[in-house]
Amino acid sequence: MNGNPDLRVKLGPLELKNPVMTASGTFGYGHEFEPFVDPELLGGIVLKGLSLKPMAGNPIPRIAETPGGMLNAIGLANIGIEEFIEKRLPRLKGLKTNVIVNIYGHSIDDYEELAKAFRGVEGVAALEVNISCPNVEMGGMIFGKDPAVSAKITEKVVKNTDKPVIVKLTPNVTDIRVLARAVEESGASVISLINTLAGMAIDIEHQRPKLANVSGGLSGPAIKPVALYQVWQAVNSVKIPVIGIGGIMDYRDALEFLIAGARAIQVGTANFVNPGATIEIIEGLKTYCLENGIDDINDIIGSLKKD
């Protein structure tokens, strides 16, 4: 055992210096966390979701704390791809880490146009495709709940981009394995999961929802057991790499996902509680490896014993 365990992992065509990434929507456009975190120490950063045009999002209040987590109904507010490419991306191009752009649309054509917009754009290592959005062409049904629609979106993005494609799956389905296989068969390089769980909270003093949107996405420690189980199911259903997301607050949580078979993890809600959480997780993984005589983090990945 040497004094410096190897934390490098591979996500299909992507090479990460360690398995710790940020989750979309919790790390801004990368530069907002610079006073707290050196992004070059991370395996990758996943930026706030982008749509074709700027979006204001939902009315306030749109965040509510819950036991063991938080609800958010931000409504995917963002600056749009034009301003991002012109004004934000130049600040990220020199970073020595994987900069991953999260994209979402409200029609299949939107996803196709977004994929085309990033073709040939330097400084973007991969696209993460958020399919947990309402499909305006199908009466507001969530894209990611339908395996056939999820597959079609994946196919369109893969066909129209020169970047590796990560598809982010919604947990609000009957069987995550069906979705995982559908996007794998349509050309996804990697899958990430889980996105937030649907939920709500009520202000009993005023008999009103705590979110103006009524419902929102639940994240944080409360969802970790669900996320861990769905990640384990996905890992055992597909051959492409899986990124684990959901309630990861420290290195112990990260290890659970790695042992279950995730090749990398994304940290989300923890960034709001502790802006330095990602760095602490990396250091915790190093210490764990040193204390347990592990030279290579890949020896931990998928090491779950079921007997």
Image (tube, helix red, strand yellow):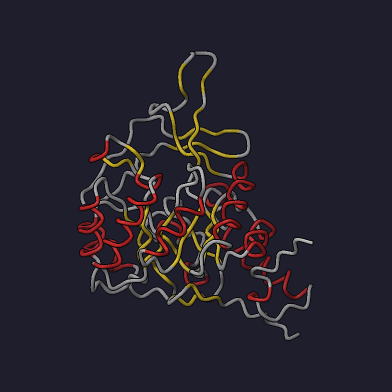
- x%, y% of residue 181? 46, 59
Name of the residue lying farthest toward the bottom: 2
x 35%, y 51%: residue: 148
Residue 34: horizontal and vertical position, in percent?
45, 62
Horizontal side of residue 163 vs 201, given as left or right:
left
Residue drawn at point x = 43 percent, y = 77 percent: 13
Q: Position of residue 175 (x, y in %)?
A: 51, 47
Tell me residue 87's x, y (percent).
24, 61
Q: Quadrant of residue 257?
A: bottom right
Question: In the image shown, does 303 or 195 lie closer to the viewer?
Answer: 303
Count every numbered label the image shows and give the total: 0
| Figure quadrant of the N terminus | bottom right
Give me the residue at 58% from left, 56% from top: 233
Question: Residue farthest to the top?
Answer: 206
Q: Is residue 134 left or right of residue 40?
A: left
Q: Which quarter shows the C terminus? A: bottom right
Left or right relative to 27: residue 65: right
Task: Describe residue 33's horizontal placement relative to residue 154 as left or right.
Answer: right
